Image (cartoon, rainbow, N blue to C red):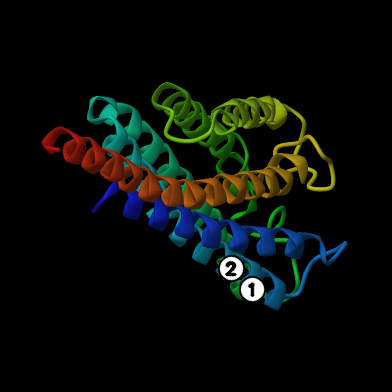
């Protein structure tokens, strides 16, 4: 697959994945108390579908890094593995929420109640924040070193990584989901998901735009090369 095609597919899957998560996040705030089962099932299905698209996105980013610089394959591998592990950290809690909603006969807030709630705290909080930060730092380094995307992508990746790391100590501040800064707080989980999805949407649009530029540059180079050859032969 050419670099242009890699950019096009990675950008496309990134846009679709981001839009799924952007749709999912507001569903967590529809009810002040325990949400009905349909809400939990719907938001979880939307989330895991979006993360399935993210799997292709992360693989595409690694391929893009390797295409631009094969010597940085290790950096591409860090980007890919951090992203895929983050997806796994989303799949498991979503499965726990759906399982609790189905098995319990009355409405509950599956983020803080039910047999699996406490097991989700680190996966949705600290672990996800660390994996996301690892991905962002590695990707930011790749962007700035290899210039495979505009510089704002790399710089913003470092900023978003720092914000994620700031929420890792939230595990010391209880588990009240109504609090902004707690192990299961809306700042630690939902707001980070919203920030992540908006950032990946912007980056994915940038990747799609870069696919057009990589298509036009070789054509222009070919025209100039042909002109020089014609001049030489003439």
Q: Quick one: SS at disc 2? A: helix
C-alpha gap between disc 1 and disc 2: 6 Å
> Which residue bears the numbered disc 1?
42
Along the line of sight, which residue is nearer the eye, 59 or 207? 207
In the image, what residue occupies the spot 75% across and 72% down?
A: 107
**On screen, 23 above or below 64?**
below
On the image, which quarter does residue 116 sit in? Answer: bottom right
Proximity of marks 1 and 2: CB atoms separated by less than 8 Å: yes
Q: Nearer the viewer, mark 1 or mark 2?
A: 2
Along the line of sight, which residue is nearer the eye, 217 or 199? 217
**On screen, 229 above or below 50?**
above
In the image, what residue occupies the spot 62% across and 30% down?
A: 156
Along the line of sight, which residue is nearer the eye, 105 or 233? 233
- Badge 2, how many Cα within 10 Å: few under 14, some, many 20+? some
Instruction: Answer with left or right where residue 21 lies relative to residue 138.
Output: right
On the image, which quarter does residue 63 sit in? Answer: top left
In the image, what residue occupies the spot 58% across and 68% down?
A: 46
The residue positioned farthest toward the front in the image shown: 234
> Which residue bears the numbered disc 2?
46
Along the line of sight, which residue is nearer the eye, 215 or 231? 231
- Residue 149 spot, x, y in % from top left: 48, 36
On the image, which quarter does residue 45 sit in? Answer: bottom right
The residue positioned farthest toward the left in the image shown: 233
- Residue 129 spot, x, y in % from top left: 59, 35
């Amino acid at each position: 697959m050419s670099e242009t095609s890699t950019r096009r597919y990675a950008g496309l899957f990134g846009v679709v994945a981001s839009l799924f998560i952007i749709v999912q996040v507001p569903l967590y705030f529809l009810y002040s108390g325990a949400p009905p089962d349909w809400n939990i099932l719907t938001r979880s299905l939307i989330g895991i579908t979006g993360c399935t698209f993210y799997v292709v996105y992360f693989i595409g980013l690694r391929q893009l890094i390797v295409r631009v610089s094969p010597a940085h394959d290790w950096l591409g591998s860090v980007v890919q593995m951090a992203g895929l592990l983050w997806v796994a950290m989303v799949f498991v809690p979503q499965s726990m929420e759906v399982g609790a909603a189905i098995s319990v006969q009355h409405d509950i807030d599956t983020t803080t109640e039910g047999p699996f709630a406490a097991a989700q705290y680190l996966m949705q909080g600290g672990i996800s924040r660390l994996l996301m930060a690892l991905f962002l730092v590695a990707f930011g380094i790749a962007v700035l070193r290899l210039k495979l995307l505009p510089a704002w992508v790399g710089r913003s990746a470092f900023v978003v990584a720092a914000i994620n790391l700031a929420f890792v100590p939230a595990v010391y501040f209880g588990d009240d989901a109504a609090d902004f800064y707690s192990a299961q707080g809306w700042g630690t989980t939902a707001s980070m998901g919203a920030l992540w999805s908006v950032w990946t949407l912007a980056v994915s649009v940038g990747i799609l735009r870069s696919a057009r530029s990589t298509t036009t540059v070789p054509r222009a180079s070919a025209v100039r090369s042909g002109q020089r050859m014609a001049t030489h032969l003439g």
